[in-house]
Image (cartoon, grey):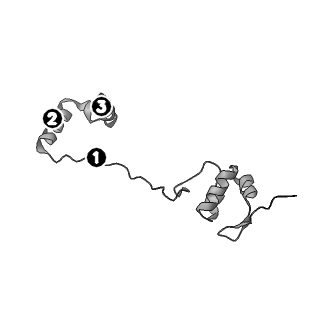
Amino acid sequence: MGVHQKIYTLSDGQKVNIHEIMAKTGIKESAARHRLSQGRDVTKILATKGTHKDYGYGRRRVLKKPSEEVKINNQTQQKLESHIKKTKPFYADPLFRLALMKISSKAK
């Protein structure tokens, strides 16, 4: 006896089951079930394995905005930063500043 397989109707009217999605996309059964639980959009369901693009599958996924430079309100800190940038030009390099922040956070 065979096992009953549920038939899902996608947004374009196409009828598929889990095993057909697995064969077309190369994903596992759990991934196919997860995609179907998130919606019925054909482009999302039938996207090949490893391609999430910008839409994603999670309901809580939010695209992060690029971080902006922190603005310094204190005048003394602004003066100190401008002095450091004038006397130590390598300090303006964002990767160098990142390394310094990581070092200072580990020291605490």
Quarter of the image for the C terminus: give it: top left
For this view, does 7 lie left or right of residue 64? right
The residue that label 3 is drawn on is 100
Question: Which circle's residue, 2 or 1, is located before the other in the chain?
Answer: 1
Helix, strand or loop at disc 3?
helix
Question: Which circle's residue, 3 or 2, is located before the other in the chain?
Answer: 2
Helix, strand or loop at disc 1?
loop
Q: How many marks can you see?
A: 3
Residue at 51 percent across and 59 percent down: it is 59
Furthest residue toward front? 1
The residue that label 1 is drawn on is 69
Q: Residues within 10 Å of mark 1 (few under 14, many from 20)?
A: few
Is 85 or 58 nearer to us in this picture? 58
Q: Nearer the viewer, mark 3 or mark 2?
A: 3
The residue that label 2 is drawn on is 83
Q: CA distance from mark 3 to mark 2?
A: 17 Å
Q: Is disc 2 in contact with disc 1, using a CB cutoff of under 8 Å?
A: no
Q: Residues within 10 Å of mark 3 (few under 14, many from 20)?
A: few
For this view, does 95 lie left or right of residue 77? right
Q: CA distance from mark 2 to mark 1?
A: 18 Å
For this view, does 79 lie left or right of residue 8? left
Q: CA distance from mark 3 to mark 1?
A: 16 Å
Name the kind of residue labelled 1 in the image: Glu
* Image x and y of residue 54, in percent: 51, 56
